[in-house]
């Protein structure tokens, strides 16, 4: 019996869900068992009800027998670099074929996040199942209800812009406009704070272009004065993430995915929102990742110090507004 278990508990939700997503996709495509992750608060109930029938440890004796007899395969960075070229499930299939493993064998594939080495493969290895993964998150009734409630707070006739400002444990920012050190593909290269000046610059361009027809939604794990001032300056509707009682940042992520346009951070959280959304987005140009890392489907505008928004983005926004005003 093949099983898939994601390792979680050491990172933010964007990082954590990458492991969960890989395991879910493999279970769906290989017919494997999904082992509930030992997720700490506030995520411990996120997948409980929906996947209860698939937990190997639902019956403790069965889980104990499985622990004593299974063979564990680490789906870590070396595994992915060697086996994965496209779908994560295809990579697991190739490994099984090479090792002579059948679906009847007692093997557990354990999916781990690798924080200090090369970041590939990214979302691209599960992107073909992105709609399924979004459905998994929305299948939690509490989350779906909160996302719908958040959507009702927006003016349906205005252009909605989602802004994700990642602060937290990122490395100190490089001054606005200065090229980041690139080429190593490491966390140190990518996980830096984007200057607040850039977020203000992009949102000011959007407000100057669309005037009162644009509204902003802010999701951030930062509570510093710069973030608070930004929220006030652009009259942002603030997300609900950051609470400890519920997985509320999942609500933020799915709300970002419903926006007409995204202003993103170099963060897995932003990448999930972009992938779920399929809408155009703005990315900080000095931190732009390589194509195989940013495996998303929609147009990208890596705006830096432009005096006006790109014409493609202006046309997109005007088309959305025209449709909503019956023009």
Image: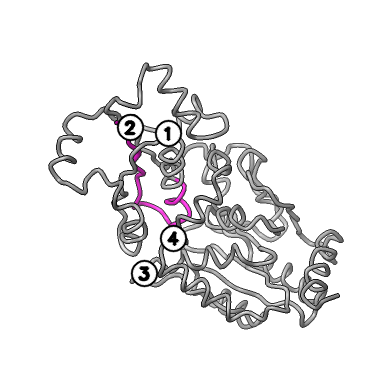
Q: Which residue is drawn at 35% across and 49% down?
A: 8
Q: Residue 128 falls in which quadrant of the image?
A: top right
- Taking the image as shown, residue 272 lies to the left or right of residue 1, namely right
Q: Range of the magenta residues?
A: 1-18
In this figure, which residue is indicated by the disc labeled 2? 2
Q: In which quarter of the image is the C terminus?
A: bottom right
Indicate which disc, 2 or 4, sits on the residue closer to the N terminus: 2
The residue to which callout 4 is attached is 139
Q: Name the residue under label 1.
A: 30
Q: Are marks 4 and 3 in contact (CB under 8 Å)?
A: no
Q: How far apart are marks 2 and 4 (CA)?
A: 24 Å
Mark with earlier residue (2, 1): 2
The answer to whether residue 175 is left or right of residue 90 is: right
Query: Residue 43's x, y, as percent?
Result: 35, 61
Q: Which residue is drawn at 57% across and 39% down?
A: 185
Q: Distance between the residues labelled 2 and 3?
A: 31 Å
Secondary structure of residue under mark 4: loop
User: Which circle, 3 or 1, is nearer the viewer?
Assistant: 1
């Amino acid at each position: 019996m093949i099983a898939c278990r994601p390792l979680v508990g050491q990172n933010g939700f964007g990082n954590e869900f990458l492991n969960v997503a890989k395991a879910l996709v493999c279970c769906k495509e290989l017919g494997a068992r999904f082992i509930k992750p030992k997720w700490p608060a506030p995520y411990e109930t996120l997948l409980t009800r929906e996947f209860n029938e698939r937990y190997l440890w639902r019956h403790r004796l069965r889980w104990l027998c499985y622990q004593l007899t299974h063979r564990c395969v680490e789906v870590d960075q070396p595994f992915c670099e060697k086996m994965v070229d496209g779908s994560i499930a295809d990579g697991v299939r190739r490994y099984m074929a090479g090792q002579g493993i059948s679906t009847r064998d007692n093997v557990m594939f354990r999916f781990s996040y690798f924080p200090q080495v090369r970041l590939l493969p990214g979302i691209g290895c599960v992107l073909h199942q992105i709609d399924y993964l979004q459905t998994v998150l929305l299948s939690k009734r509490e989350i779906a209800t909160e996302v719908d409630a958040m959507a009702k707070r927006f003016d349906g006739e205005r252009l909605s812009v989602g802004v994700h400002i990642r602060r937290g444990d990122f490395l100190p920012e490089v001054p606005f406009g200065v090229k980041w050190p690139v080429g190593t593909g490491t966390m140190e290269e990518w996980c830096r704070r984007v200057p607040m000046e850039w977020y203000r610059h992009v949102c000011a361009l959007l407000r100057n272009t669309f005037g009162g027809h644009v509204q902003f939604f802010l999701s951030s794990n930062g509570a510093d004065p710069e973030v608070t001032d930004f929220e006030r300056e652009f009259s942002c509707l603030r997300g609900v993430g950051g609470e400890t009682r519920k997985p509320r940042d999942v609500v933020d992520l799915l709300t970002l995915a419903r926006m007409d346009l995204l202003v993103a951070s170099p963060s897995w959280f932003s990448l999930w929102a972009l992938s779920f959304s399929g809408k155009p987005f703005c990315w900080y140009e000095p931190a732009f990742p390589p194509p195989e890392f940013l495996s998303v489907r929609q147009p990208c505008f890596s705006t830096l110090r432009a005096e006006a928004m790109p014409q493609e983005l202006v046309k997109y926004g005007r088309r959305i507004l025209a449709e909503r005003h019956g023009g």
